[in-house]
Amino acid sequence: MAKLFESPVIWIVLLLAVLLWGAPKLPGLAKSLGESMRIFRKEMKTMGDERSDDKKDKAKEDPSSDK
């Protein structure tokens, strides 16, 4: 991760973001992005749990498939 900030490209992107949206709006954008990421991870975990539950249910319904 430290090597990411050594590249001049990331600094140019950050500078453009500040110029386009302005410094006061960036914390709000970061908060919004963080909340979106949290919701996305929660939904992905829920989907994974549902899949594992479905597999367990199928195994209980059809024990002949284990043979």
Image: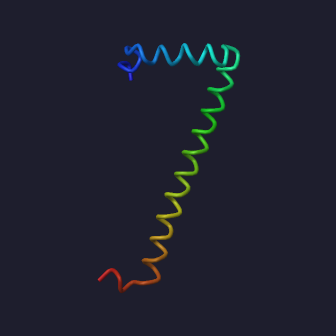
Give the residue displayed 29% in from the left and 83% down from the top. 67
Which residue is more in the foreground, 61 or 28? 28
Question: Residue 34, located in which quarter of the rendered image?
Answer: top right
Which residue is more in the foreground, 20 or 51? 20
Give the residue displayed 65% in from the left and 20% down from the top. 26
Q: What is the basis of the colouring in this image? A: rainbow
Rendering coords of residue 39 (x, y %): 61, 44
Q: Is residue 45 left or right of residue 65?
A: right
| Residue 32 drawn above or below residue 59 | above
Rendering coords of residue 12 (x, y %): 48, 14
Q: How many marks?
A: 0
Which residue is more in the foreground, 64 or 35? 35
| Residue 23 drawn above or below residue 67 | above
Question: Residue 21, located in which quarter of the rendered image?
Answer: top right
Give the residue displayed 46% in from the left and 71% down from the top. 56
Q: Is residue 40 left or right of residue 25?
A: left
Rendering coords of residue 59 (x, y %): 42, 77
Q: Is residue 26 left or right of residue 47?
A: right
| Quadrant of the snapshot with the N terminus | top left
Name the residue furthest left: 67
Rendering coords of residue 33 (x, y %): 61, 32
